[in-house]
Image: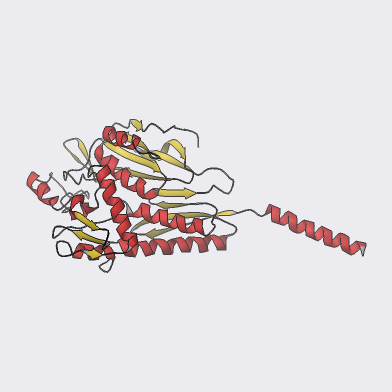
Amino acid sequence: MRKLFVLLFSFSCLLSIGQLERRDITVKKTMKLMGTRFEITVVAPNEEIGYLDIDEAVSEIERIEKIISSWDPNSETSKINQNAGIKPVKVSPELYGLIERSVKISEITDGAFDISYASMDNIWKFDGSMDSIPSKEAIESSIAKIGYKKILLNPDERSVFLKEPGMRISFGAIGKGYAADRAKELLSSKGVKGGIINASGDLTTWGTKVTGEKWLVGIANPLSKDKVFSWMPIIESSVATSGNYEKFIMFKGKKYSHIIDPRTGYPTTGINSVSIFAKQAELCDALATAVFIMGKDSGIHMVNQIDGVEAVVVDSNNKIHKSSGIIFDTNP
């Protein structure tokens, strides 16, 4: 009997040791969603559960895309665009809330961020086919239908009305961040300990690595994307970067970014990249575009007035500017 007891005791000890030694792992998957590259990383007890968690995040992102896509003729967003200048469209609370927040960001940024930028005619080409800058008349005509004040919201009816025929809204400068936030919220609510939702550079994190270390994001040098000049820890937080590394044109020695100011119709100049840090990826996404358009001085001044938001701006001379709360760490 004693021998049996010793054997049982030894077996239970082995089980305990095995349980202590079992550790969570990191599971990662890259795919194309919302027309861009998404990389989803989760901390999970095993690979099978990790991929199941990722699949749930993917389903959530696809659900959001069906609501906010301006390319899908059956989406709620497309129905708003189709009825521009005709009648208001009643929408879901989710889409109404996103549009309402977008308009508030437009107000804060004095129109530098504007979801009605989609009304702009595509007169600027960044594929090498342009041999001259569009005329002043063409640019003025291009932006005639843009203006966040022309987006009329009715909270009682929960409806959205675009005031002018031909107006369009699009969530290209906020949608990826919103989707990343929602995917993060879903996984966190299901008990996933930690992870990263990376939507083509707009990313949000929660928890820590399997080692317990903080997630780190590298701020790239705009002249060499493979080189990092600073590492920033992001704890239960988000970051988004807007840059002109690949899409730009040169005229008479001047560099014009593919990011166009919706207020003037002209591409931005003077900035190579903007990185915004905040709690929500949605806000980071929108403000990265806005600061790029506003310029380093006005943009950083605005960021310094918003609690919980920080910015790193690299100007066209590759000089680094930052908001008041940023402290650089050059060691990963």
Quarter of the figure that contains the N terminus: bottom right
Residue 111 appears at what percent x and percent y? 22, 45
> Looking at this rendering, what residue extends furthest in the front direction?
156
In the image, is residue 120 above or below residue 288? below
Q: Residue furthest left?
A: 137
Q: In the image, residue 244 lies at what x, y percent?
A: 29, 43
Q: Would residue 332 appear left or right of 302 to someone viewing this image?
A: right
- Foreground residue, 314 or 327? 327
Residue closer to the observer: 330 or 321: 321
Q: Indicate left or right for 65 with 52 as reference.
A: left
Residue lying at 15% horizontally and 57% vertically, measured from the top left: 163
Asked which quadrant contains residue 66, the reply is: bottom left
Instruction: Please state the horizontal and vertical placement of residue 147, each as a whole percent of the image.
Output: 18, 50
In the picture as drawn, the residue positioned furthest to the bottom comes out as 74
Residue 151: x %, y % from top left: 21, 55
Q: How is the image coloured?
A: secondary structure
**Count of marks placed on residues:** 0
Judge left or right: residue 112 versus residue 242: left
Q: Nearer the viewer, residue 326 or 123?
A: 326
Is residue 172 something one can see in this rendering? no
Is residue 188 at all visible to an observer of this figure? Answer: yes
Q: Residue at x 22, y 63 (%)?
A: 80
| Residue occupying the point 60% across, 58% down | 45
Give the answer, above or below, for where 302 lies relative to 144: above
Residue closest to the eye, 54 or 255? 54
